[in-house]
Image (tube, grey):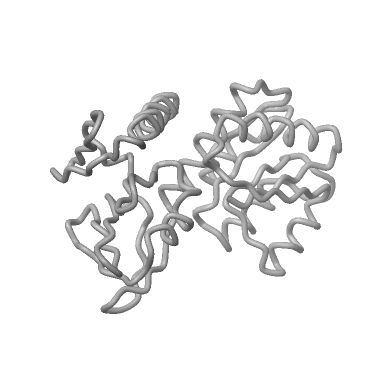
Amino acid sequence: MRIAICDDIPKELEKILAALDVYKEAHPELCFEIDQYSTALDILHAVEQGKGYDIAFLDICMPGILGTDVAGEMLAQSPDMGIIFLTISNEYAVAAFAMNATHYLLKPFSQAEFDMAMDRAVKKVMDCAFISLSCVDGMYRIRISEIVFIESQGHYLMLRLSSGEVLRMRKKIFQMFEELKKYSEFIQVGASYIANLSFVRKISVDTMKMYNGTNIPIPRRSSGKVQKAYMNFCRNEAMK
């Protein structure tokens, strides 16, 4: 995930980076690319040059321009971006939420408050994320959240979608997982499956039962890892 941080006070930038480090330790499945900006003009220039972000931390009160104005420019380019505003006052809260901000952090903020903001932003990104797929019958652009599971069959992958549709593509499963592993809901199960944990109804020592009725076999050597991943996923979902 690409994250932008914009604050004109260096110490505040450091605090956000430190909080992100703590969050990353708790979520090793997520990969972050972080850019820092000390002025609104710098981040706006980067966006104008084609720089795109999934999540942006924006101080509202910056010299020359409000963070809400910066957010407006960024959202015009990336409507699904998660915007987290930072401020020392509630003065601009109404304006912030009128822009459909993901969260609004009052300084000084606690790690728990920061984690809540990040959880919401990450969820928004995940829910809106798309992937382009070159399948045997053409190109598809689908939401990540539509994928229930992927099964390897010979030289092909069968992608089962929540709609019931099945897409067929020529690709190795480890290559597909490389594309999906940044999304916390996906896990590789043995050598033949990738499962979306959001669609798991029940998990046992040797079987993962999906809501569509499919039973995915869990290899004995992977059982502990898969069950732990599912418990962590459920725990994180419950905290959101």
Relative to 147, is 19 above or below? Answer: above
In the rendered structure, the answer to whether residue 154 lies left or right of residue 235 reads left
How far from the left and from the top, in percent, is residue 33?
66, 50
Q: Quadrant where the C terminus lies? A: top left
Q: Name the foreground residue: 18 vs 67.
A: 18
Place residue 114 in its image quadrant.
Answer: top right
Place residue 44 in its image quadrant.
Answer: bottom right
Give the tally of numbered discs: 0
How far from the left and from the top, in percent, is residue 17?
74, 36
- Which residue is located at x 25 percent, y 29 percent? 205
- Which residue is located at x 28 percent, y 59 percent? 152
- Which residue is located at x 55 percent, y 46 percent? 82
How far from the left and from the top, in percent, is residue 233?
40, 32
In the rendered structure, the answer to whether residue 75 lies left or right of residue 59 reads left
Q: Name the foreground residue: 86 vs 161.
A: 161
Q: Residue furthest front?
A: 221
- Which residue is located at x 80 percent, y 43 percent? 62
In the rendered structure, the answer to whether residue 23 lies left or right of residue 236 reads right
Relative to 135, is 182 above or below? Answer: above
